[in-house]
Image (cartoon, rainbow, N blue to C red):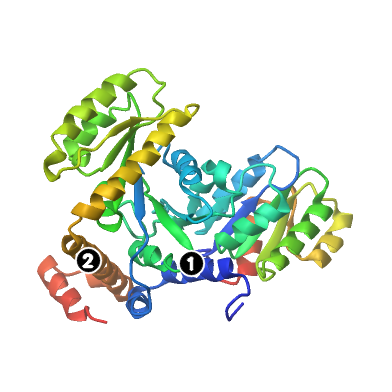
């Protein structure tokens, strides 16, 4: 499998200022063949959705360590839908307690990645989801 | 998702993806429906780390207004190993990324080794008719970008930084003969004045066609330098309107675009034929490839 030709936006919404994980994932996706765009720190869901549209990405990966993952996922889903881009796949990674996973899935997250997973597992899950 | 979106910006960005991903046959088929070139195009080139993206952010903010939305196409290199890429130009354009009058699109270089991307000419054409007033094209900044960008844009801006050895390297390579405007960026670094003086000497010899390329110093904290660059681009556009050899420019673009398509077709043929196709001497291989060329 490969992510050749897939465009993925890695985004940091909210207030936490740690993006080592986001950058490691970005590089791993690049090595799997994807074209990866990174937003930089502290972006609003509205901004992330607009970049996703302008860059015509297949998927957005939100990296969230602040604990506000529910609000930020819901808000990003809403902003994407507002731009007629609800079909763009959404993933979320970070410090996300297991009891929140169902709620995030219901909100529209197609994959939830935590520190217990290996990078290879994360990439494989995204490959499987994007269907190549 | 299929069918046009109710969001025009989405339709444009998806059209750009279709063009960027098109193989040679599809590219040729799509060309018949593309609009003709009208928008002024500014090309920004220079070595990696020269500050192209940051400078484009400043420039786009100066040049856009209610009547002139600005589109930025930024090419980043694809990994020769995975074919993937980190499209990192956008993050350096932080200051303008939230501006609705500026559209930024990052594109991977893919197979192209000339500092641009596959189908760049078609991508530029596709920006026509979407309400933009101008296009800024950023190259990868390696290889022979300075030569190829020349054929696709109206004004070439070459960015150099002090003490990078750039000036001498650029003279050696003949790159200093290709630009319409020179920028010495990060001009607060030592050696900037000397470098600007060296480039000015070269530029003075470059005025055979009537345009002497200006040398502009820019520093992050000095708006005057960026204003001077803005003015220089306008001055070059005005000069060009009177002096441009339209026929020669059209021929150069046709040549670049067609050579690119044929080169990619050869890649496609080789990939389809498999490794053992290469087990013949160059003459036989040449004939075999030529016999397979065609739509």
Q: Which residue is mark 2?
A: B259
Q: Quadrant of residue B113?
A: bottom left
Secondary structure, mark 1, is loop
Q: Which residue is mark 1?
A: B130
At 17% from the left edge and 64% from the top edge, which residue is drawn? Answer: B247
| Between B176 and B250, the one nearer to me in the picture | B250
Secondary structure, mark 2, is helix
- Residue A22 visible in the picture: yes
Q: Quadrant of residue A121?
A: bottom right
Tally of numbered discs: 2
At 33% from the left edge and 74% from the top edge, which residue is drawn? Answer: B24
At 51% from the left edge and 50% from the top edge, which residue is drawn? Answer: B65
Residue B162 percent location from the top left of the image? 34, 25
Chain of the residue under label 1: B
The residue furthest right is: A99
Alpha carbon separation for disc pair 2 and 1: 28 Å
Residue B215 percent location from the top left of the image? 29, 32
| Between A99 and B194, the one nearer to me in the picture | B194
Viewport quadrant of the C terminus of chain B: bottom left
Instruction: Indicate whether A131 appears above or below A14.
Output: below
Tag of residue A66: none
Left or right: B66 in relation to B139: right
Residue B105 percent location from the top left of the image? 49, 57
Instruction: Indicate whether B86 appears above or below A53.
Output: above
| Between A60 and B189, the one nearer to me in the picture | B189
């Amino acid at each position: 499998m490969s992510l050749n030709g897939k465009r993925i936006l890695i985004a940091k919404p909210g207030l936490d200022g740690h993006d080592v994980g986001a950058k490691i994932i970005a590089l791993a996706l690049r090595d799997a063949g994807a074209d990866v765009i990174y937003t930089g720190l502290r972006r609003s869901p509205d901004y992330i959705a607009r970049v996703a549209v302008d860059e015509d990405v297949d998927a957005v990966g939100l990296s969230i360590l602040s604990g506000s993952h529910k609000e930020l996922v819901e808000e990003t889903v809403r902003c994407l839908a507002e731009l007629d881009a609800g079909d763009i796949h959404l993933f979320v990674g970070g410090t996300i307690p297991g009891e929140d996973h169902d709620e995030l899935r219901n909100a529209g997250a197609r994959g939830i990645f935590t520190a217990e997973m290996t990078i290879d597992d994360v990439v494989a899950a995204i490959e499987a989801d994007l269907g190549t | 998702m299929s069918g046009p979106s109710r969001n025009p910006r989405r339709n444009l960005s998806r059209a750009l993806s279709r063009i960027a991903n098109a193989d040679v046959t599809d590219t040729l088929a799509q060309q018949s429906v593309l609009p003709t070139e009208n928008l002024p195009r500014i090309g920004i080139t220079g070595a990696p780390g020269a500050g192209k993206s940051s400078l484009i952010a400043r420039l786009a903010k100066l040049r856009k207004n209610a009547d002139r939305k600005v589109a930025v196409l930024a090419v980043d290199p694809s990994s020769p190993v995975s074919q993937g890429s980190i499209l990192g130009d956008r993050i350096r354009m932080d200051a303008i990324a939230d501006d609705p009058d500026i559209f930024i699109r990052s594109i991977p270089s893919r197979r192209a080794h000339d500092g641009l991307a596959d189908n760049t000419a078609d991508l530029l054409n596709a920006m026509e008719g979407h309400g933009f007033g101008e296009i800024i094209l950023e190259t990868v900044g390696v290889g022979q970008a300075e030569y190829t960008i020349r054929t696709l844009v109206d004004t070439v801006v070459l960015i150099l930084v002090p003490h990078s050895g750039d000036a001498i390297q650029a003279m050696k390579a003949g790159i200093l003969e290709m630009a319409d405007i020179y920028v010495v960026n990060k001009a607060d670094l030592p050696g900037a004045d000397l470098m600007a003086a060296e480039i000015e000497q070269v530029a003075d010899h470059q005025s055979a066609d009537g345009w002497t390329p200006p040398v502009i110093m820019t520093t992050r904290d000095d708006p005057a330098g960026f204003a001077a660059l803005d003015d220089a681009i306008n001055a070059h556009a005005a000069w060009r309107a009177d002096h441009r050899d339209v026929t020669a420019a059209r021929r150069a673009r046709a040549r670049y675009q067609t050579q690119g398509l044929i080169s990619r077709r050869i890649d496609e043929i080789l990939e389809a034929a498999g490794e053992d196709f290469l087990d013949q001497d160059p003459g036989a291989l040449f004939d075999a490839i030529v016999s397979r060329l065609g739509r």
